[in-house]
Image (cartoon, rainbow, N blue to C red):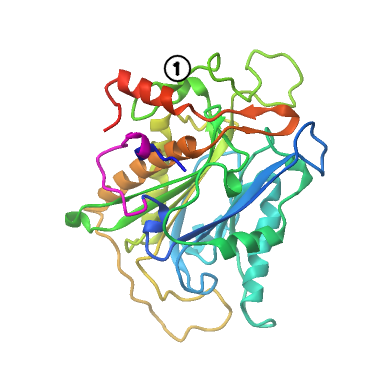
Amino acid sequence: MVRARDLGIVIGKGQPGPANAITDVAGVRVGHATIIRGNGPLVVGQGPVRTGVTMIMPHDGDVFTDSVYAGSHRLNGNGEMTGLEWIREAGVLSGPIGITNTHSIGIVHDGMIRAGVRAHPKGGSFWSLTVAAETWDGLLNDTDGFHVTMDHVDEALAAAHDGAVEEGNFGGGTGMVCHEFKGGIGTASRVVPAAFGGWTVGVLVQANYGRRDLLRVDGVPVGEAIPVTEVPSPYRPEDDDGPADRPVAGSGSIIVIVATDAPLLPHQCERLAQRAGLGIARMGGTGANSSGDIFLCFATGNRGLPGISFAADPRLAVDVRAVNDHVISALFEGVIEATEEAILNALVAAETMTGRDGITAHAIPHDRLIETMTKFGRGPR
């Protein structure tokens, strides 16, 4: 798997963690279940299938009963992420996070709840409002065929690990397209300077948005330099008056998950989540009307919070810590840079994929990317 830094392309001035991934936040793990089968014309219910599910475990404890503070942000709301009402109300995340295709969000939600029920005594006070998010993979995938099952959720949960994360055509990102190139899963991290706390912030994206001509990499107009006349787009041209069963360029969405070990309160998590939009903007994203750009940040710096079960917690008050807002801008910068690099990693790691009806999403050509970056003085370093 090739990443941006393998090509010598460095985003920003911040210092990545050891894996340059969301898993650099201690305890965070990521797992995928990837489903690829069939070729040729679309037969709904049979394929071709190019989809999957990605699971993020927020810490190494019981994620269903050991809550962490969280907050969310919506850049454009043409999408879905479940569980946000309780996060907005109580400011806590209680469970794993699943990302999949649009029409499988329900089964992934149910699969996570089934996993939680199996892990806890039946008939007790356990309940869960899990977070499941989606982007649409219908360009390449038989998305109306409902090929993701609860067993795939179990597979992704069992596969969750720390360290390097599989990127591009894996899990929920299997059938995704970004800036009219093949997209999918990407991740990156930043460690803020010791003077500002030394905390780690990690980002994972499912990138499925954007027009080619708007794509920027470290400020370089890469999309203009590699137009659709050179590397074809899987989308229908905007001036195509044919049947609208194949969307135009720029359709699609992006999900961003931000993790940090900093001791943040829920409103501070919201502030970090909001900054993901600036990283997307740097890459040329606009929050288009057709796009579901939804972000979630969770923080593991406060543990031992009251559980969400009906069993009474005997404590009348809980002591928590909070980052001084005087230094929180360092975390903002980390989120912005990590989001930008995570999207780029999704593009660089993804491989060309042909899906339903012979539609092909081409990988961004690494040689042309390096050539363009070098031309603008931002080449390998």
* Percent coordinates x, y for residue 169 in the rendering: 57, 42
Residue at the (54%, 66%) spot, across then down: 95
Verify whether residue 276 appears in magenta: no
Residue 141 quadrant: top right
Query: Closest to the observer: 60 or 379?
Result: 379
Mark 1 surroundings within 10 Å by alpha-carbon count, few (fewer than 14), some (14 through 19), many (20 or more): some
Tell me if I can see residue 292 in this picture.
no
Query: Would residue 248 appear left or right of 295 to someone viewing this image?
Result: right
Residue at the (60%, 32%) spot, across then down: 290
The residue range painted magenta reads 6-19
Q: Is residue 249 above or below residue 324?
A: above
* Percent coordinates x, y for residue 201 in the rendering: 35, 53
* Percent coordinates x, y for residue 171 in the rendering: 59, 49
Query: Closest to the observer: 81 or 379?
Result: 379
Q: Amino acid at mark 1?
A: Glu
* Percent coordinates x, y for residue 129 in the rendering: 60, 64
Q: Identify the residue under disc 1.
A: 224
Secondary structure beneath label 1: helix
